[in-house]
Amino acid sequence: MKQEPGEKHGDGQDMDNPLSNEDNRWLSLPLELTTAIFLVCHATDSTVRDLLEGVNSSQTRLPTEFVLSSICRDWRSLALDMPDLWKRFIYTPSGRVDCPPEKLELYEGRSGGQLEDIYLNFLSGSSEDDFYGFLNDLLQQHNQSLRRFVLIGEGGLEMGSILTEVFKDASMPNLEYYAVVSDMVLDVAADLVEIEFLNTFQFTNGAPKLKYLYCNGVMAAWGLPPTNKLTTLRIEGGEPQCTFSLDVLHEVFSFPLLENISLSIPEIVQYTPEDNPNSPITARRLRNLRLCNTDLDDDLEPGFTQFRFEDLLLVLRAPALEYVTLKNFSAVALNKLQASSKSFPTVHDLILINCDTSNPSHCLVFKTLFPSVQSLTVWGNSGTMQLFAMWPSLKRVTVDDVFSPGIVSWPEPTSNRTLRVPRRTYTPWKEANEQRHLEMIEPMEIEEH
């Protein structure tokens, strides 16, 4: 009997696209397992991560749902019958992700008409008027179902116009995750924009479920969405013209449900002698704190002093704090902390990135601030071996290959302690400690940069 092109054998194999036995095993998995694999692939799609992290790609890549639905007829049928694969819409007008607006109708149909996740990246060279209209229609159509919304503005998009014209009066009853970042200086910016107070400027008609907010200093200056339910706040990056006032810093840490905060702003705070930089800042529910210092600004306005993150640590009260990441804390910053007896006894995980750990006295500063550390990561800077003996409570240390291999001097017993080192430096670390018969050194893979 003659077989038509594309017709399947009884084993599910296409005549015009023969598969190996190994391929066939993948295509004959139980339906429940294949469905679970599809959902995992969709959840870990790197196109989403690349968009959020600003990773450029010279090649246009298809989203996972299109790849999965293009393998064979069985997989296509299954993918088209899974609405959860089509509730995330990614749109970059002129580059990385091939999902133009004309495909929006396709997503709406396959998702059951309700998109939950929208990722938009506006690149230079695209029509702003067309984009505004497209964005406005998108939000009006899906504002009731939208759960996660990301808008990245690159190379010329005046985000202030979007915030004032599109988002201001929008209602987002189910929005949980909101990220809006622009590389533009504020439309109204001159030489310096100081954020003197925070106001609810976006979604004034409500975003009662919003828990995660990511923006840069430029966007924060326009005003934030409702913050009464926020558990995670990231304000990272922004133009050098953007600063915070002390009042804003107090207000940010006083959000009632805030548990995680990451701050990395070119100009943290400037204050005058009339302000009180020693006033306590209280964050009662804060569990995870990430602070990234920038270079000291020598061009401050007359009569102003810069309030930096080492100053914040001196006045912060966070009784529930458990995880701390400090980045770019120089010797100058540590010298300021050295005379203080301030401590956070509840912190058990400490990550130090590009911090000065080569001086034993500076290491002692970290020990005084965080006396109960159990997990320590030192990245991007060489350090003294005395760091290993600072904490009797220490159970795990992770270092990168900048940290020179040496003899680990942990107090006895060492059986419950682990040192994680890059695989390429594993042998030197092992040889340096061979006489001690330490079994706690583990190799790990790190990404090449």
Image (spheres, helix red, strand yellow):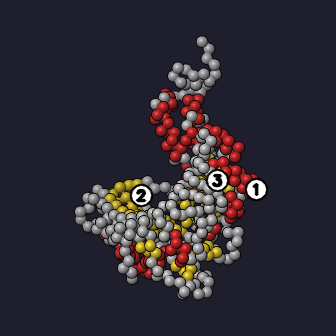
Left/right of residue 210 with respect to residue 370 in the rendered view: right
Mark toward the start of the polypeptide (3 vs 2): 3
Q: Residues within 10 Å of mark 2 (few under 14, many from 20)?
A: some
Task: Identify the residue shown where x is 54% and y is 76%.
Answer: 247
Dot 1 corresponds to which residue?
129
**Label ID, residue 120:** 3
Above or below: residue 283 compared with residue 157: below
Is residue 96 in view from this perspective? Answer: no
Task: Identify the residue shown where x is 52% and y is 46%.
Answer: 43
**Label ID, residue 361:** none
Task: Identify the residue shown where x is 66% and y is 61%.
Answer: 168
Above or below: residue 74 compared with residue 292: above
The alpha-carbon separation of the residues under discs 2 and 1 comes to 50 Å
The alpha-carbon separation of the residues under discs 1 and 3 comes to 15 Å
Is residue 259 in view from this perspective? Answer: yes
Mark toward the start of the polypeptide (1 vs 3): 3
Q: What's the residue type where badge 3 is placed?
A: Leu
Q: Quadrant of residue 87?
A: top right
The location of residue 175, given as percent across then percent down, is 56, 54
Left/right of residue 405 with respect to residue 248 in the rendered view: left
Above or below: residue 277 compared with residue 266: below
Dot 2 corresponds to which residue?
422
Q: What's the residue type where badge 1 is placed?
A: Asp
